[in-house]
Image: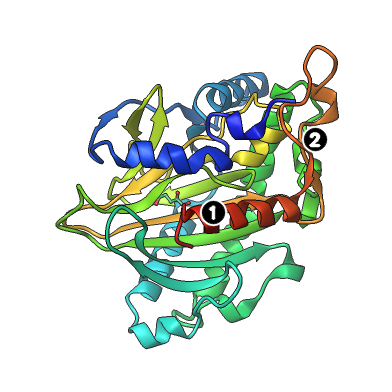
Amino acid sequence: MEDEKNHKTSPSSLPSLCKQLASSTLRESMELNIPVVDLSVSDEAFLVSEVTKASEEWGVFQVVNHGIPTELMRQLQVVGKQFFELAEAEKEAVAKEEDIEGYKRNYLQGIKAWDEHLSHRLSPPSLINYKYWPKNPPQYREVNEEYTRHMKKLTEKILGWLSEGLGLPSLALTQSLGGEMAEYVIRINYYQPSEKSELVIGAAAHTDIGALALLVPNEVPGLQVFKDERWLNVEYIDSAVVVIIGDQLMRMSNGRYKNVLHRAMLDKERFRISWPVFVAPDGDISVGPLPELTGDENPPKFETLVYKDYLHQTFAKWAVEKVYSS
Ligand SMILES: O=C(O)CCC(=O)C(=O)O
């Protein structure tokens, strides 16, 4: 079995990689087109091939004509922005406590996270804690619930194509994440502009620990992905959704799908906001290379672990190595 530590962008390899990346100039990046997949195409085989190729080669792609109403995306952005524009005391009413959920301000010195964010679970219903959902603006809950319904549909479609790309039945990846028990968590990142945007980073280089993330940014660019030894800007496309492959899809696909290293830069003058929804396995599910994909010729490259144990191990490592501020 390949040592997971040696995998290029596994979470455990992040500290050394981050140090190396932090020492390079933050603005050393290029425009290059991340794959864009138009989901209005009716040829399913074509969509399977496009999404699979993008996930193998890039670990990131954008989707357009994805079925989420543009007006709903606009409302999601309006209510999210309105929350961050509230007085600090009102935002603190949903402050983060022990868990991942809640509001936190993170304006730190140096190359670390420079953001405010709000996270909370969207699904499954049994794990939702409305205590972390803002009461103000009043439409916040309704808009986020409607967005969740669309997000789940889109996620399951993408997982279906990614399953078929591995030669598996289309429900394989959805079921391996726990089906209806898979966790959906939204995080709204609110990045204040900074005069020192060459020196301070909004979100430090990382891969996503879950299976995948579907992200909607505002019009201020800043998301970058690391490919072929350089940082590339993710072009802003109005109403597109950016799909980011995370660690668990890499592990389940036995390394075929790439967990892309990414980071978020600040703008000098404008607020940048992003709305990723992270999709992760049910905590009680064992996650590792799918048995159908391994054999004598293709041994498992990753250890199979109960997902919550994997999380504990990884968070403990990060705490020691101070990789992220949460
Ligand atoms: O703000 C962005 O575009 C990236 C955010 C991100 O990577 C994260 O929240 O994990």
Q: Is residue 319 above or below residue 240?
A: below
Coloring applied to the structure: rainbow
Q: Residue at x 51, y 81 (%)?
A: 94
The image quadrant where one finds the N terminus is top right
Q: Is residue 320 left or right of residue 297?
A: left
Q: Residue at x 85, y 28 (%)?
A: 291
SS at circle 2: helix
Q: Is residue 304 above or below residue 85?
A: above
Residue that carries the numbered disc 2 in the rendered image: 172
- Which one is closest to the eye, mark 2 or mark 1? 1
Q: Earlier in the sequence, mark 2 or mark 1?
A: 2
Asked which quadrant contains residue 296, the reply is top right
Q: Is residue 49 left or right of residue 310?
A: left
Residue 237 can be seen, yes or no:
no
SS at circle 1: helix
Q: Nearer the viewer, residue 285 or 69?
A: 285
Asked which quadrant contains residue 124, the reply is bottom right
**Residue 92's x, y, as percent?**
44, 83
Name which residue type carries label 1: Trp
Q: Nearer the viewer, residue 11 or 166?
A: 11
Name which residue type carries label 2: Ala
